[in-house]
Amino acid sequence: MEGMNCSPFEANAILDTVYEVFSPAMVSDEQQDLGQMYLLCTGIENSSSKPLEKAQMVRVRLTLDGGSEDTQVRRTDGIIALRQHRMERMASSLSTRRAVNTGGFRLPHLQLRHAHADS
């Protein structure tokens, strides 16, 4: 709480709000490794007309950086192949969990404009 330049009361109020808002998304039995992140997506069975607050949400663990596997792909096939490899891996994770990325979250270096430029 030091370094927030506010009173202890204000610092506790901020921390309480952070825990209240973010703790449901952070609770997990699964270990998150380096290069991984969790993304909250809508379930594939939700219709496009259903508001997000009423939609069934699915928590998906995505691996952005696959470590030595990604290094090997980049070394042998280049940066374009690495980007395509990462996109395929994350799309597979979404598909396995029956989830859809609503587009509210963009992954750096893995946007659609890169895919068009690569083809």
Image (tube, helix red, strand yellow):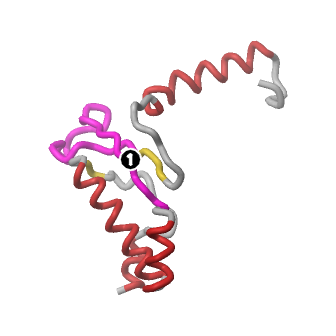
Crowding at dot 1, Cα within 10 Å, few <14 / some 14-19 / many 20+, comes out as: some
Above or below residue 90? Residue 45 is above
Which residue appears at 26% of the width and 31% of the height? 54
Regarding mark 1 in the picture, which secondary structure is present there? Answer: strand
| In-front residue for pair 111/52 | 111
Residue with the mark numbered 1: 61
Q: Is 100 on the left or on the right of 12, as rendered?
A: left
Q: Is 4 on the left or on the right of 101, as rendered?
A: right
| Position of residue 17 measured from the top left corner of the image (x, y, whole percent) | 58, 22
| Position of residue 4 measured from the top left corner of the image (x, y, whole percent) | 79, 29
Above or below residue 27? Residue 32 is below
Residue 113: image quadrant is bottom left
Q: Quadrant of the C terminus?
A: bottom left
| In-front residue for pair 92/101 | 92
Which residue appears at 19% of the width and 47% of the height? 44
Q: Is 52 on the left or on the right of 46, as rendered?
A: right
Q: What residue range appears in magenta?
A: 39-65
Which residue appears at 35% of the width and 60% of the height? 90
Residue 57 belongs to the span the image colors magenta = yes
Residue 49 belongs to the span the image colors magenta = yes
| Position of residue 74 measured from the top left corner of the image (x, y, whole percent) | 48, 79
The total of numbered circles placed on residues is 1
Q: Quadrant of the N terminus?
A: top right
Residue 81: image quadrant is bottom left
Above or below residue 31? Residue 95 is below
Which residue appears at 43% of the width and 56% of the height? 63
**Mark 1 residue type:** Arg
